[in-house]
Image (cartoon, coloured by chain):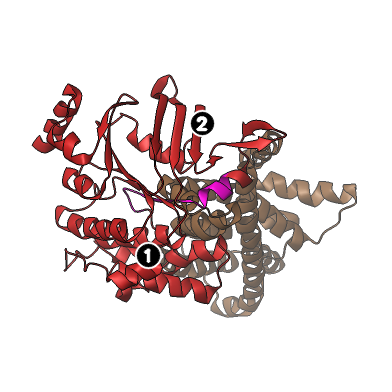
Amino acid sequence: MPPTDTTPDAPSPKKEAAAAVLPRGGAPGIRFEKVVKRFGSNVVLRELDFSVAPGERVTLIGPSGSGKTTILRLLMTLEKLDDGLIWVGDDTLWHMEKGGKRVPANQRHLHEMRKRIGMVFQQFNLFPNMNVLRNLTEGPVRVLGLSRDEAVERARGLLDMVGLADKIDAHPSQLSGGQQQRVAIARALAMEPRVLLLDEVTSALDPELVVGVQDLLRDIARESDLTMLCVTHEMGFAKDISDRVLMFDQGQIVEEGPPDRIFGEPSEQRTRDFLQAVLAS
Amino acid sequence: MTVDWDWSYTGDILPDLLKGLRYTIIATLAGYAIAIVLGMVWTLLRRTPFAAVNQAVRWITEFIRSTPLLVQLFFLYNVLPSWGLSLSSLTTGIIGLGLHYSTYTAEVYRAGIADVPRGQWEAATALNLPRSRVWLDVILPQAVRRVIPTLGNYLIAMFKDSPLLLAINVAELLHEAFEVGSKSLMFLEPITLVGLLFVAVSVPSSILVRRLERRYATY
């Protein structure tokens, strides 16, 4: 059994540490154009249109099965697009130009596009066969071509920021859920993405560990200019970090607006019902 | 009925039997090396996007798994030379054991890979790791670790199948026992010793496999 966090409130990252390690500049916007995603006969996203400005923080809320997570998974290329276009900056994610025509992306195009995007998962998904340091250096060394020393230095800076500098040699199984998730956040940031996708990152955590991870993400939101898309059921957290909230139902946006209005005075009945259900749970 | 056990005869034949045991162990270890490498090759070939390769490997391994090892050994020993491929009986035996068991280790690897959670593949994609690194650094280390105990059990199973090499004249343990027995026409001691020597190797090996199992249960 993994040890529990003795300090549920993770130390807030030192601002200088965060400023030193967080990537800055060039965060792209995102645009979905008539995006369709089906699983078998089940249409999860139907001609979805929406956009996110460069550096904007957007939270997706809605009942399960409403397509929120699918949006993040399409952006991370974990699911294939069925129809429509997804723009990341000035380029389409799933398509490329060839001979003046737009054709489906090949692996090289996807590889290039993925460099801009990082994702943190509900189940952390750290590599259990590697220690914390190697989890953080594997990508920078193998993908970004950093030297081992540069990668280690970057990893140390990030671990410092997430308050786990002393766990650098630990294996994921020796960490609590909250610590694992903080390492997973550091691992995503080590790739210097310009877009960060957060998929229910605190849902799998014991309640007392949630705060530490949320505080860390709040700091990252404040200290970086990343474009962030966040799926969460934690409404307080959503309110803190988002510029805008999108309420989804059945693959469509039901309502959108600044968090104060969506959570304070939603105009749609479905949003009110959903928020009530979440608060009751 | 009394059984006369001749201790001095036992002492006389023991060196010959130990020599046989040496060949048994050589054949097992060399065959096992082939089985664990070739099994991985089968598994990876079955995952190639080329349907023809995929299907060919599927049928080859299915065929080998569904025919008796003894028949395969006879085939390799008696048919290959007529195709101009002459190998020593020991080499033939090693290849036979390795080939046969590779189809089992292939299944073991396949199951091990299938057991690696989908989230590991997804995290590797999110980190943009190239395909080769995903396999070498993330998936295979986890998959192989999960199947080490099963692979260990196949080593012991293979060891116990090695007397079949008698059929193609490999001077392994059982072969040597028959040899000395037919000279003196006393079979009780050599055949009993064969059993005891197998136990002497198998039991410690099983204990070792259990230990590996415990050791690799967690990271």
Residue B153 visible in this rendered orientation of the protein: no
Q: Position of residue B65 (x, y in %)?
A: 62, 42
Kindly report which numbered mark, 1 or 2, lies closer to the viewer in this rendering: 2
Mark 1 = which residue?
B219
Amino acid residing under circle 2:
Leu
Looking at the colours in the rendered structure, which chain would you say is drawn in red? A
Q: Position of residue A81 (x, y in %)?
A: 50, 31
Q: CA distance from mark 1 to mark 2?
A: 42 Å
Looking at the colours in the rendered structure, which chain would you say is drawn in brown? B
Mark number, residue A85: 2
Q: Is residue B153 left or right of residue B18?
A: left
Q: Position of residue A99 (x, y in %)?
A: 72, 34
Q: Which span is picked out in magenta?
A: A110-124
Q: Position of residue A76 (x, y in %)?
A: 46, 44
A281, A48: nearer the viewer? A48
At 48% across and 52% down in the image, what residue appears? Answer: B124
The chain to which mark 1 is attached is: B
Density class for disc 1 (Cα within 10 Å; few <14, some 14-19, many ≥20) is some
Amino acid residing under circle 1:
Tyr
**Occupied quadrant, residue A4:** bottom left
At 40% across and 36% down in the image, what residue appears? Answer: A51
B70, B180: nearer the viewer? B70
